[in-house]
Image (cartoon, rainbow, N blue to C red):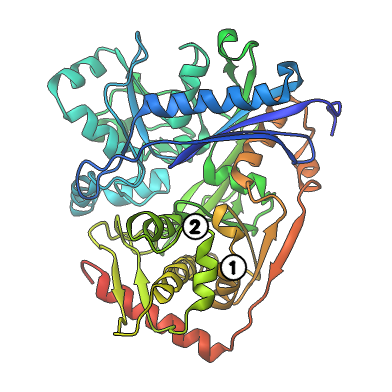
Amino acid sequence: MTLSSEKLLLAIDQGTTSSRAIVFDLHGSPIATAQRPFSQIYPKDGWVEHNPEEIWQTVKDCVRSVLSEIGDVSRVATLGITNQRETTVVWDRKSGDPIGNAIVWQDRRGADICRDLFASGYADVIQQKTGLIPDSYFSATKLQWILNASREIRERAEHGELAFGTIDTFLLWRLTGSESHKTDATNASRTMLFNIHTQKWDEELLNHFNIPRSLLPEVQDTASVFGVTAPSLFGRALPITAMVGDQQGALAGQSCFQPGLAKSTFGTGAFVLLNTGEEAALSQNKLLTTIGYRLNNKTAYAVEGSVFNAGTIVQWMRDEMGWLNHAADSDKHARASTNNKVVFVPAFTGLGAPHWDPDARGALYGLTRDTTQADIVRAGLEAVCFQTKDLMDAMHADTGDHLSLLRVDGGMAANDWLLQSLADVLDVAIERPTNLEASVWGAAVLAGLGAGVVSSLEELETLRSVERVFVPSISADQRAAKIETWTNAVLRTRSSP
């Protein structure tokens, strides 16, 4: 690295269920870590909200905690932000106060708007411009819903009194003392309002969704200068030189900088991204074309498949059903299962790619009198693998490439049983890095790049180390039988053919 050894990189990781801050040295080792959970709000079936003020407080607490632990703030060279994508916040430009709760990426209240887009034939226009298949997953319908909630909100937006942002933008506004209203290209590409070919907010889409242009942030390269923190926050102004959506952060953290490299992050959801380089290839199999990163005004694109529920399956089994004391216990329960006929389709908030069925709901199949908790826990972990298989098949159909290797990260990637099952279902090698915190590490090293203290992407690739590789261990017939059982269960769960 070009930076002296005592210098450190700070990254904020604002996720769906918690906020974290991690200080890394220049070899990717965490020096200090802090994490704070925050409330999940479920006003109605399929609705998910967060309190932006609670998020902001947890972020401040985490950053102050890690800076206190390292002792000398001057050791921190720069700050990067990675965030839950699509989650939508609107706030008052003068006071900085949110006008309501954030609407979370999992929220389904925009499903009717999306049905109308398909019925009118406008869905094709959106996909051509944004690479996205219309779904309430993305920010546009959430923002439209907020603006239509009352005449007062609509009028304030049209008069330029309000600001919109995904979580990265909201945090930047607060961190910089209301000085900076910006986002990066990766987060902008998830709004369903950003033209990924022109790299601009699309006026036609803004008009279609009736969203005033004045609400939107300025879009910058993923690694660039976004502003500096207010000195009063952390005792010193820190430069903010990267912002990146969490999945694209993991793409960078896994050093997937060459076309054909893919990663899957297993967190609240599961997200597979395949780097396609300079080609923004539109999927014919209900996957998404998105921006992997934009550096020096040069865009690298990716194909993405999203599973809405992965870690949430384990959380549900732990918190709602009481079957697990700790999430890590799922490995032990799965190993104890003797019944592999139970199938769990975890469509808590609908099915994501490649099905895109917002009305599907979770279901268990194959239950018998002797079914145990361990059998259902096993089925829950296998569901993550089967959903990933659906995505990988669609990617193969789109690109013609059959991947022989998948790089994995995220909290669930610590589960050996899950990764062995994933290798068996996918019939590919699964590569687990030493550092599972790929998203936040990606934000840190991109910030180093943006600050000029990391020289190149090639330099970043040398920092990645592999802890273990899982290889397939079942026969082709066993694999085919498993996949057929899963496919039949999904068909029975779908709200429509």
Whether 343 is drawn above or below 318: the answer is below
Residue at 49% x, 11% y: name it.
Answer: 177
- Identify residue type, mark 2: Ala
x then y, percent, for residue 408: 61, 58
| Residue 24 horizontal side relative to residue 486, left or right | right
Q: Position of residue 195 (x, y in %)?
A: 43, 38
Which residue appears at 30% of the width and 81% of the height? 367
Residue drawn where x is 43% and y is 84% of the image = 339
Q: Quadrant of the N terminus?
A: top right
Give the x, y percent position of residue 12: 57, 31
Residue situated in front as seen by the camera: 64 or 324: 324
Image depth: mark 2 or mark 1 in front: 2
Q: Which mark is residue 93?
A: none
Helix, strand or loop at label 2? It is loop
Front residue of 122/413: it is 413
Q: Which residue is mark 2?
A: 327
Q: CA distance from mark 2 to mark 1?
A: 15 Å
Badge 1 amino acid: Leu
Residue 212 image-quadrant placement: top left
- Vertical comparison of 481 with 255: above or below: below
Q: Position of residue 300 (x, y in %)?
A: 60, 44
Residue, x 65% and y 11% (percent of image)?
Answer: 236
Q: Quadrant of the C terminus?
A: bottom left
What secondary structure is found at the residue carrying circle 1?
helix
> Along the horizontal axis of the image, is 48 left or right of 56?
left
**Position of 30 relative to 388 (above/below):** above
Residue that numbered label 1 is attached to:
419
